[in-house]
Image: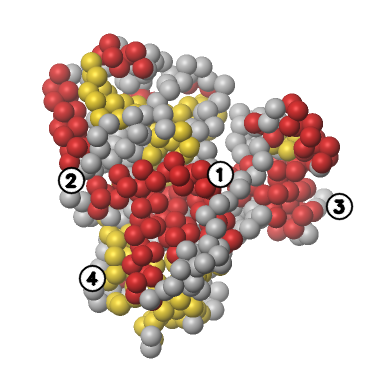
């Protein structure tokens, strides 16, 4: 019997795993997909919210400010790109400005003390890209941006280096109570017995909860569509630009990624099916027209891809975190929609403390908070590149031209803890395939490297796990 089974390897499950690895515990993370960050975390906006928006007194208001404050130290430890570039919530009328004032007051209740309302001239001084419609803006200096899947990967790798285990392609079909814990039946027929369970299953967290608790949850999948622009796009706003939030969320934003891409979105529409990740002409048209209200121009001819993600919206409109009253040792971390990414470090810390207290766990004396990322050839000076190539000639072979990703980086991505086994796994660890040609040039080369390094046939290589095979055989 293990100590902790964490269901779900998104940013929340991996944050909990990393914090639990501070204790001497036998930890296993179960993920039904082939890699970490395959659900909500892969299609996240990557915004680290300041914490002014969540209603005072909610769990969102509790964990967002604490989590946001943890990002500078956390990302330094994990070698993850993070920029504290600030954000603006823009208003288009004097009536809307009064709503900004209410948001400022709510932010103060949540402990956010760096908020300021700017008039049009002040807002334009720090963000010249604003449209003529903007009348005023709420400025949050502490807001930031991070790469959501790189953060998730880093949390997972650090957890593994500190003793946690991960099992992929391991969906949970059933949970039974047993003496001193729970028995989890997986979709491959195997079972795991554990003293405690952490339910971090994202949009499926209600199904996991409802297997064991009389207090039923209902998660509504909320789809958001995005457009991503080429990194060469001109005149990108230096900070994240929001519009006033509505009943469906924080609304359409205009932002930059930590890697320099412009992106806009998301839309917000409740959907029935939990695998509905299709983009629609209406949805993309809506986000582009809405985003155009915030900024003076959008380089729509430079859109390189569109995508959609699903958020786990609970009917209560708040996070569900804690030990179940009717299931001792079973901890829910459910309904983690925005500001879930911003809250993740604090949620991981809090849930780990709850579980450790339940198990009377002792500290892991060998815990090491530091994780080093894959060296990025594109960010090196010419002298650094020459030195790397002399040490390893594979650094001299560029596989992805758009993002300047080398063979050496891809090989390391495969052989790291929780190494990549799929095309998407390579993409998220190295950015190979994320550029303007959207992997048109590098796919075949990456297939060659995966087949060689994993010693598997080409037909076994997938885009993102079982059912997404690219090749059916070799031409005779």
Residue at figure coordinates x 31%, y 37% from the top left: 50
Q: How far across and down, in percent of the image, does residue 24 sit?
A: 49, 72
Q: What element carries label 3?
A: loop
- The local crowd at label 3, few if under 14, some if 14 to 19, many if 20 or more residues have their Cα within 10 Å, is few
The answer to whether one can see residue 374 in this image is yes
Q: Is mark 2 on a helix, strand or loop?
A: loop
Query: Seen from this angle, which residue lies furthest right?
Result: 476
Instruction: Give the mark, 1 or 3, whose residue is nearer the N terminus.
Output: 1
- Identify the residue position indicated by label 3 in the image: 476
- Residue 441 horizontal side relative to residue 142, left or right: right
The image quadrant that residue 102 belongs to is top left
Instruction: Give the mark, 2 or 4, whose residue is nearer the N terminus.
Output: 2
- In front: mark 3 or mark 4? 4
Residue at figure coordinates x 34%, y 75% from the top left: 358
Q: Do the residues labelled 3 and 2 touch (CB within 8 Å)?
A: no
- Residue 117 horizontal side relative to residue 148, left or right: left
Which numbered tag is attached to residue 56? 2
């Amino acid at each position: 019997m293990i100590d902790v089974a964490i269901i779900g390897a998104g940013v929340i499950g991996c944050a909990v795993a990393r914090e639990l690895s501070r204790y001497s515990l036998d930890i296993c993370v179960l993920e039904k997909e082939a890699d970490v960050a395959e659900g909500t975390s892969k299609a996240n906006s990557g915004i680290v919210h300041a914490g002014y928006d969540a209603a005072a007194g909610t769990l969102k208001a509790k964990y967002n400010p604490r989590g946001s404050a943890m990002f500078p130290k956390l990302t330094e430890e994990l070698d993850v790109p993070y920029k504290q570039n600030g954000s603006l919530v823009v208003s288009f009328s004097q009536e809307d400005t009064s709503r900004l004032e209410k948001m400022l007051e709510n932010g103060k209740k949540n402990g956010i003390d760096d908020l300021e309302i700017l008039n049009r001239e002040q807002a334009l001084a720090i963000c010249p890209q604003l449209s003529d419609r903007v009348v005023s803006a709420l400025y949050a200096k502490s807001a930031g941006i991070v790469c959501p899947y790189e953060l998730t990967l880093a949390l997972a790798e650090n957890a593994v280096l500190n003793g946690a285990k991960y099992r992929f392609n391991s969906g949970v079909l059933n949970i039974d109570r047993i003496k001193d814990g729970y028995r989890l039946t997986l979709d491959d027929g195997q079972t795991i017995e554990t003293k405690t369970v952490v339910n971090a299953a994202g949009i499926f967290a209600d199904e996991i909860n409802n297997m064991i608790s009389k207090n039923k949850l209902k998660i509504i999948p909320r789809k958001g569509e995005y457009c991503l622009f080429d990194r060469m796009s001109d005149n990108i706003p230096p900070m994240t630009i929001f519009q006033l939030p509505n009943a469906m969320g924080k609304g359409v934003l205009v932002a930059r990624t930590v890697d320099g891409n412009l992106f806009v979105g998301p839309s917000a529409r409740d959907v029935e099916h939990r695998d509905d990740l299709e983009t629609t002409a209406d949805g993309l048209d809506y986000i582009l027209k809405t985003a155009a209200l915030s900024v003076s121009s959008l380089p729509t001819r430079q859109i390189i891809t569109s995508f959609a993600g699903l958020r786990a919206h609970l009917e209560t409109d708040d996070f569900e975190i804690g030990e179940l009253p009717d299931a001792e040792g079973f901890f829910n971390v459910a309904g983690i929609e925005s500001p879930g990414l911003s809250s993740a470090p604090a949620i991981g810390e809090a849930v780990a403390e709850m579980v450790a207290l339940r198990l009377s766990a002792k500290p892991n004396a060998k815990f090491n908070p530091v994780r080093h990322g894959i060296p990025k050839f594109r960010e090196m000076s010419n002298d650094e590149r020459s030195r790397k190539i002399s040490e390893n000639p594979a650094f001299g072979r560029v596989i992805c031209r758009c993002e300047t990703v080398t063979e050496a980086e891809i090989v390391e991505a495969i052989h790291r803890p929780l190494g990549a086994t799929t095309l998407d796994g390579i993409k998220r660890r190295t950015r190979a395939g994320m550029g303007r040609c959207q992997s048109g040039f590098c796919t075949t080369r990456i297939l060659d490297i995966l087949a060689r390094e994993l010693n598997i046939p080409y037909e076994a290589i997938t885009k993102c796990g079982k059912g997404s095979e690219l090749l059916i055989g070799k031409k005779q």
